[in-house]
Amino acid sequence: MEFGTKDRYQTIRDAGEYDWQRLGELGVLGAAIPEEHGGLGLGALDTALVFEAAGYGCKNTGLIFAAGAHLFATALPIAEFGSDSQKKKLPRMCDGTLIGANAMTEPDAGSDISALKTTATPKDRGYVLNGVKSFVSNGPTADIIVTYAVTDPAKGHLGTTGFVVDADTPGVMKSEPFSKLGMNGCAAGTVEFRDCAIPEEAVLGNGSVVFQHGMLWERACLFAIYLGVQDRLLERCLKHVKQRKQFGRRIKEFQSVSNRIVDMKLRLESARLLLYKACWAIDTNEDAVLPAALSKLAVSQTAVQNALDAIELFGGRGYQTDEGIEEHLRDAVGGLIFSGTSDVQRQLAALELGL
């Protein structure tokens, strides 16, 4: 699909029906990938606006999250650090032909890249991977996996290496999708490497550098999904309080209700500005670690609190699954955990502040 900057975001907001291929057609899957590799070539802020628009337009929040994991944690690292042969995969990742997954988290390591147990042992001008990765978004359906393994235990987190692995490589074992609280449009599972032989050409780069680059973009841009979702939720809440009557009055006339709506709007716009600032820092080559951590923290907490407020505004109807209000809460809770928990973001911010 061809469209200019002026109408790109409205086109995505109004797309109507979404599936993986449709996201490829709209440019969402390759928003930040250079045009020569099949993407839109957008910076961080414009990419965030794309995901914000998709979050607003698509009610399947998990699907848009899956697109974000595919782009920021898989395609973008390949575009930034990959070899020419690895970059040949990008056009098919941008158009939705191939699905990417990032296999970093391990059952006992969590966000601690220095505690990885997956190993990559040199052998026959290549490596043999062994280890288990958990909570892999897109893992069960992935065609391409960016993963991280220990290559030099003596160097701690600097002794890890990133690899690009084809999911059909012998020794790659993908689990069935996990059952989760929310984000059901994103299949997540376990990926295990059992004596998985990969060529030297699979090396992507220093694991710590590659991973942190992807996480910086993910924390800043992916969470724009929740901005779009919250815009849609707030619109629905406004419509509801203007129509719903109790005790002979529209409930918007009760100050407790109007104050709740204002607080929802305040949180949303404050989080939006923090996220835009984080993206601006990336685009201008400023140090983006602190703004990205603060924006991820603010947006994820806003999504949870605004979803709770929406449930209270809708009352019993908000608690019923048929109304779709409670789904906002289930989808929001994951934001407190993935891409680094809220406590991890606070720790990152504290370190940046010299604490």
Image: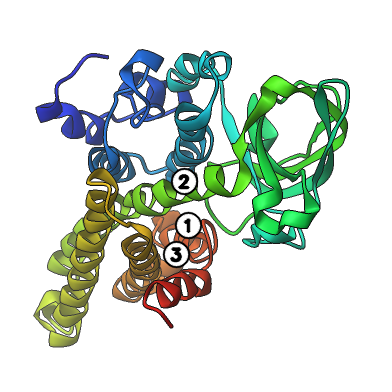
Mark nearer the N terminus (3 vs 2): 2
Give the residue number, with chain letter if any, for mark 1: 331
Could you tell me the amino acid type at mark 1? Asp
Foreground: 83 or 139?
Answer: 83
Query: In the rendered image of this protein, does residue 316 appear above or below residue 175?
Result: below
Who's the residue at 18% across and 28% down the image? 8
Give the residue number, with chain letter if any, for mark 2: 213
Residue 191, image quadrant: top right
Task: Please state the horizontal and vertical placement of residue 19, each as a whole percent of the image.
Answer: 44, 27
Q: CA distance from mark 2 to mark 1?
A: 25 Å
Query: In the rendered image of this protein, does residue 309 appear above or below residue 233?
Result: below
Mark nearer the N terminus (2 vs 1): 2
- Label 1 neighbour load within 10 Å: few <14, some 14-19, many 20+: many
Looking at the image, residue 276 sits to the left or right of residue 72; the answer is left
Who's the residue at 33% across and 30% down the image? 31
Q: CA distance from mark 3 to mark 2?
A: 29 Å
Give the residue number, with chain letter if any, for mark 3: 329
Residue 18 badge: none
Query: In the rendered image of this protein, does residue 345 appear above or below residue 46?
Result: below
Who's the residue at 37% across and 27% down the image? 33
- Label 2 neighbour load within 10 Å: few <14, some 14-19, many 20+: some
Foreground: 18 or 52?
Answer: 52
Q: Quadrant of the N terminus?
A: top left
Q: Secondary structure at mark 1?
A: helix
Q: Quadrant of the C terminus?
A: bottom left
